[in-house]
Image: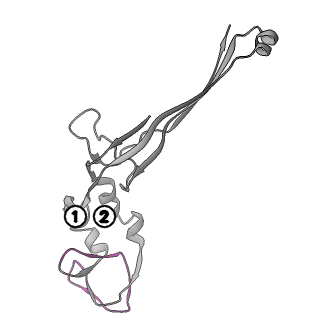
Amino acid sequence: MAETYQGADIYAGTKSVMRDLGTWYDTGNQEIADRNYFESNGNIINIGETFRGNIADFGAGPVALTESWYNGEGGFFGGGNDELYIEDGSWTRIREITLSYIWKSDWLKNATKLKSIEFSATGRNLVLWTNFEGNDPDTNLSGVSAARGIDYFNNPGTKSYLFSATFNL
């Protein structure tokens, strides 16, 4: 069964904390300044200098997002701006699919005295399509509550497989 949820917003709390700590994948980017960039602490990165971080434009021209940014306004622990981490939480997934085959033949009945054997394979949470960078946008921080749409080191739904054989007399 395929399932979809469109138009959801999710707070990417895991991403905000890991950026603050410098452990989110894009905080390790190395950029070479193709112009002079301001950092959030007021320092200037001169053209041609290499720096660790990213470049973003919040409307007043491009700026360098470096450690000072992620430890301040762009992070979690420095009193950052949580709105920066509200993302599209839309998703589509294959929640569960089962394939079965029933083997029913005169040979089977004569050789084993069985009417049939049914073989089946079931997979759960096999594929997830989303633009959300966290584990799983279909998450809920505190169980069944109003905390839906908050990703903060939540565990994703588990992927599982089930195989069975049913012998019919």
Q: Which residue lies furthest to the right in this view?
A: 111
Residue that badge 2 annotates = 20
- Whether residue 51 is in magenta: the answer is yes
Relative to 18, 167 lies left or right:
right
Q: Distance between the residues labelled 2 and 1?
A: 8 Å
Against 163, residue 15 (above or below) is below
**Magenta stretch, residue numbers:** 38-59
Picture residue at 23% right of the left edge, 62% below the top: 84
Residue type for callout 2: Asp
Q: Is mark 1 on a helix, strand or loop?
A: loop
Picture residue at 17% right of the left edge, 80% below the top: 60
Residue that badge 1 annotates = 78
Against 96, residue 11 (above or below) is below
User: CB atoms at circles 2 and 1 under 8 Å apart?
Assistant: yes
Quadrant in which the N terminus appears: top left
* Spot occupied by residue 133 in the image (x, y as percentages of width and height): 38, 56
